[in-house]
């Protein structure tokens, strides 16, 4: 779990980002203008990431980032010009995401930054199963579970996208790679194997005509 500050003045976008990050078990704080952002930054020394819009009331994101020290920043903004991107990245930001964006892309980029700064969770626990994401060791009720490399890859994708609906095509791209030549039935076969090995018949939900979702609140 990471502590993330979202600074975004468009409340629906701010709330949507929060909802998706909370589903990933992150603790999320929200600010809707530059003043609120500075107040939170001054009072919290335990932040792991700041997601920052550039165009904000009272104070721009480019000015706010000058006040942020030792915390990675990701810009999320509608400004998509190359000069804007260069200015954002050279100001010290770790990443620059242009609106509109897919929430899965946001989560993937957040995970990469947290992993780079070693702020991401290294273990995952659900229904008697413990997964060490660093050593790739899986245990169920204290007994080690042996997974094939492809089963592990699929499991990691499901965990890092917990509570998010994933189509079979997206799972193929994320767990097998874009150059995989098989079909979506491969996903179904591996899901069956994971359910059996982990006892996650109720945790890995089948989504009719879509794909699957790993639920952590069963």
Image: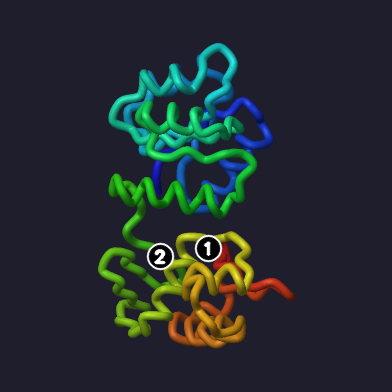
Quarter occupied by the C terminus: bottom right
User: Which secondary structure, mark 2?
Assistant: strand
Spot occupied by residue 80 in the image (x, y as percentages of width and height)? 57, 34
* Quadrant in the picture for residue 47: top left
Q: Is residue 110 above or below residue 48?
A: below
Residue 172: numbered disc: none
**Left or right placement of residue 58 versus residue 46 in this view:** right
Mark 1 crowdedness (10 Å alpha carbons): few <14, some 14-19, many ≥20: some
**Left or right placement of residue 137 versus residue 180 in this view:** left
Spot occupied by residue 68 in the image (x, y as percentages of width and height)? 35, 24
Residue at numbered disc 1: 216
Q: Which of marks 2 and 1 is nearer the N terminus?
A: 2
Mark 2 crowdedness (10 Å alpha carbons): few <14, some 14-19, many ≥20: some
Identified at 44% across, 38% down, the residue is 4
Spot occupied by residue 16 in the image (x, y as percentages of width and height)? 63, 42
Residue 125: numbered disc: 2
Q: Is residue 141 above or below residue 14?
A: below
- In the picture as drawn, the residue positioned furthest to the top comes out as 58
**Left or right placement of residue 117 versus residue 154 in this view:** left
User: Which secondary structure, mark 1?
Assistant: loop
Identified at 55% across, 85% down, the residue is 182
**Left or right placement of residue 211 versus residue 192 in this view:** right
Q: Please tell me which residue lies in front, 27 or 96.
A: 96
- In the picture as drawn, the residue positioned furthest to the front comes out as 82
Q: Are marks 2 and 1 in contact (CB under 8 Å)?
A: no
Q: Is residue 212 above or below residue 165?
A: below
Q: In this view, does 139 lie above or below 55?
A: below
* Quadrant in the picture for residue 137: bottom left
Identified at 50% across, 28% down, the residue is 84
Identified at 60% across, 35% down, the residue is 14
């Amino acid at each position: 779990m990471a502590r993330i500050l979202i600074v975004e003045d468009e409340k629906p976008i701010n709330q949507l980002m929060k909802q998706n990050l909370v589903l990933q078990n992150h603790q999320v704080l929200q600010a809707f203008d530059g003043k609120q952002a500075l107040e939170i930054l001054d009072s919290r020394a335990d932040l792991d990431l700041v997601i920052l819009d550039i165009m904000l009331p009272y104070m721009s994101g480019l000015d706010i980032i000058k006040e942020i020290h030792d915390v990675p920043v990701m810009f999320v903004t509608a400004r998509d010009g190359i000069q804007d991107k260069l200015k954002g990245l050279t100001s010290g930001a770790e990443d620059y995401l242009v609106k509109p964006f897919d929430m899965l892309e946001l989560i993937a980029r957040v995970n990469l930054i947290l992993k780079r700064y070693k702020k991401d969770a290294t273990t995952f626990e659900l229904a008697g199963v413990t997964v060490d994401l660093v050593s790739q060791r899986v245990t169920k009720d204290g007994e080690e579970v042996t997974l094939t490399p492809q089963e592990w890859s699929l499991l990691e994708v499901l965990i890092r996208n917990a509570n998010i609906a994933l189509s079979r095509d997206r799972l193929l791209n994320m767990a097998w790679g874009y150059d995989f030549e098989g079909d979506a039935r491969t996903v179904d076969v591996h899901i069956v194997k994971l359910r059996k090995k982990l006892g996650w018949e109720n945790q890995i939900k089948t989504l009719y005509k879509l794909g699957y979702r790993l639920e952590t609140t069963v």
